[in-house]
Structure formats: structure tokens, C-alpha cells
């Protein structure tokens, strides 16, 4: 038998084996999916019952729990509380919690044992090796904090941007005859977003027995936005001294519109300064190459 035929036979055998294994795996997956859909089905074998759970619950969750315990052991006192507070300010993202942040910090801390061998394999050496490994380790270690701070900043910007629009709709609704809670409920339905979610939670707290003042203070603590906090303080003073809600909302809406216009003008004034560095380091060198390049070539040829 020639080597070519031997190779064909081996390839056919490997392909048949792969087909059998894949078919078996697909069949088992279909059976498990069918068993998951059966309501009230009692599984007698404990192992089969555990195997019906997703891999994220069977493998990832215990591993994450063990790593989170190790991370909490080496975390400085008070850091977990700060992370939890930032998560509240970020709106409690569904894919992040305190344990995941701590585990990411732990993995970034121990990643120093990976970066040096990796850059050595890439044939880095000397000072370049040390600088690249240190920068990569710093990025891996600080990435969870940067990610969390970015989520907090984005949510606070969204709340500040939506606040004037919601106040305008509140003014229209209250002056049309609705009460504050009814107007707020209608406005939250018309303007979705993070601020509307906070107002809905405030309304829910009021409906289950909390006072308006306590619900407003809790919302200010959850959001930590200066503009929203000033509006809440004005609302608390209006409740204390009996000021008309419609007049207060109109004055707050006017003030928020003025603040938004001033903020836009401030950003426009900062734009030339921010454009200076790209001009100097990115655009001017290319312009110099295009303008002075032919002249330098002619001078070098003449000399």
C-alpha cells in the first residue's frame, strides 16, 4: 500500500471518528435541552440533574466564587465598599458586581507573571522588555477601575443631559393640571433613560410608604449628579416652606437650560486648545514633509 493511500485511510478514519464524536455531542446537547424544557420532570440521577445546569453555573460560578474569596482576603479595607458605591452610581450594570471587579483586580495583579515571558517570546530585551511588561501590567491592573469610572461618568452625563428636557415636560404636565407624581410618571414614560429609571424608583419608594423627602434624598445619593442634587434640594425646600410646585419647576427648568447652554459654550471654547496637540504632533509633521521634502531632496542633489 502506497503512502498516499495510507494517508487517505488515516484521514478518513480521523474524519469518521470526529463525525461520531460530534454527532454524539450534538445528540446529548439536544437531549439536555429537551429535558430543560420539560416542566415538572423529576430527574432521579443527581449527576444528570447537575449536568443539566449551564456550564456557567457548573464551572464558572464556583471558580468565580473561589477567586472572589481570595480577592477579598487581599483587598484593602474599605475598597469593596467604594466599589459597591460606584456600582450604585453606575446604575448597577447587569454584567458587573463587586466580586467580578475584585477578581479582575486580582487577575490584573498576578498577570505580571505572564507579561515578562510573553514579551521575552516576542524577542524583547533590556529596558524595552521592562517598560512594555510594566505598562501591560499597569493597564491590566487599572482596567477594572477605569471601566467602572467610565460607566459612572457616562451615566452621570446622561442624567445631566436629560434633566432639562424632563423638567420642561414636568412644567407642561403640572401646569396642565396633573399632580407631581402623575406628571412625573407620564414624563418618565415619554423620556426613557437612566434619569427616568431613577424617577420611577423614587415613585415606587413613595408608593410603598416612604416620604417624598426620603425618596428624593435617596435618589440624590444614588445618582451623585450636581444638577440633579440642586433640583432635589429645591424640591425639599418647596415641600418645607409650601412653595408652588409649578413655579419651582419652571424656575428650575429655566436654570437648567441656561446651565446647558453655558456648558455647551464652555466646551466650544475648549475645542481650540484640545485641537492644538493633534495639530502639532499629527498634522504639522505631515505638512512639513509634503512642503519641505521636495526642497530637501533638491538641495541634497545640488550639493
Image: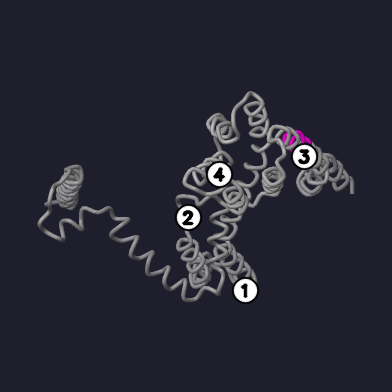
Residue 255, quarter of the rendered image: top right
Q: Main secondary structure of the magenta part?
A: helix
- Reply yes or no: does residue 255 show up in magenta: yes
Q: Earlier in the sequence, mark 1 or mark 4?
A: 1
Query: Which disc is residue 6 wearing?
Result: none
Q: Earlier in the sequence, mark 3 or mark 1?
A: 1
Residue situated in front as seen by the camera: 48 or 211: 211
* Residue 116 location (% of width, % of height): 53, 71
Residue farthest toward the front in the current orientation of the protein: 242
Q: How is the image coloured?
A: one colour
* Residue 198 location (% of width, % of height): 55, 44
Residue situated in front as seen by the camera: 250 or 96: 250
Residue at numbered disc 4: 198
Instruction: Give the extent of the magenta segment.
Output: 253-258
Nearest to the eye among marks 3 and 1: give it. 3
Q: Earlier in the sequence, mark 4 or mark 2?
A: 2
Nearest to the eye among marks 2 and 1: give it. 2
Residue at numbered disc 1: 126
Residue situated in front as seen by the camera: 294 or 90: 90
Q: Are marks 3 and 2 in contact (CB under 8 Å)?
A: no
Mark 1 neighbour density, 10 Å: few (under 14) some (14–19) many (20 or more) = few
Amino acid at each position: 500500500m502506497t503512502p498516499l493511500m495510507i494517508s487517505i485511510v488515516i484521514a478518513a478514519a480521523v474524519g469518521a471518528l470526529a463525525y461520531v464524536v460530534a454527532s454524539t455531542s450534538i445528540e446529548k446537547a439536544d437531549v439536555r435541552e429537551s429535558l430543560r424544557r420539560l416542566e415538572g420532570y423529576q430527574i432521579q440521577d443527581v449527576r444528570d440533574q447537575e449536568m443539566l445546569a449551564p456550564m456557567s453555573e457548573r464551572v464558572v460560578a464556583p471558580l468565580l466564587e473561589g477567586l472572589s474569596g481570595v480577592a477579598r482576603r487581599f483587598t484593602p479595607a474599605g475598597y469593596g465598599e467604594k466599589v459597591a458605591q460606584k456600582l450604585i452610581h453606575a446604575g448597577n450594570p447587569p454584567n458587573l458586581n463587586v466580586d467580578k471587579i475584585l477578581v479582575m483586580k486580582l487577575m490584573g495583579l498576578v498577570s505580571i507573571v505572564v507579561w515578562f515571558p510573553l514579551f521575552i517570546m516576542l524577542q524583547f530585551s533590556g529596558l524595552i522588555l521592562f517598560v512594555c511588561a510594566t505598562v501591560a501590567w499597569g493597564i491590566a491592573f487599572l482596567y477594572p477601575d477605569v471601566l467602572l469610572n467610565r460607566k459612572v461618568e457616562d451615566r452621570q452625563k446622561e442624567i445631566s443631559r436629560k434633566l432639562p428636557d424632563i423638567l420642561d415636560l414636568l412644567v407642561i404636565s403640572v401646569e396642565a393640571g396633573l399632580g407631581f407624581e402623575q406628571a412625573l410618571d407620564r414624563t418618565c414614560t415619554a423620556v426613557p433613560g437612566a434619569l427616568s429609571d431613577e424617577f420611577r424608583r423614587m415613585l415606587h419608594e413613595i408608593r410603598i410608604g416612604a416620604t417624598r423627602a426620603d425618596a428624593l434624598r435617596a435618589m440624590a445619593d444614588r445618582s451623585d449628579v450636581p444638577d440633579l442634587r440642586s433640583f432635589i434640594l429645591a424640591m425639599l425646600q418647596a415641600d418645607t416652606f409650601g412653595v408652588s410646585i409649578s413655579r419651582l419647576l419652571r424656575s428650575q427648568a429655566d436654570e437648567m437650560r441656561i446651565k446647558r447652554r453655558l456648558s455647551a459654550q464652555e466646551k466650544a471654547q475648549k475645542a481650540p486648545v484640545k485641537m492644538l496637540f493633534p495639530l502639532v504632533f499629527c498634522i504639522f509633521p505631515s505638512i512639513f514633509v509634503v512642503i519641505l521634502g521636495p526642497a530637501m531632496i533638491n538641495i541634497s542633489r545640488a550639493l
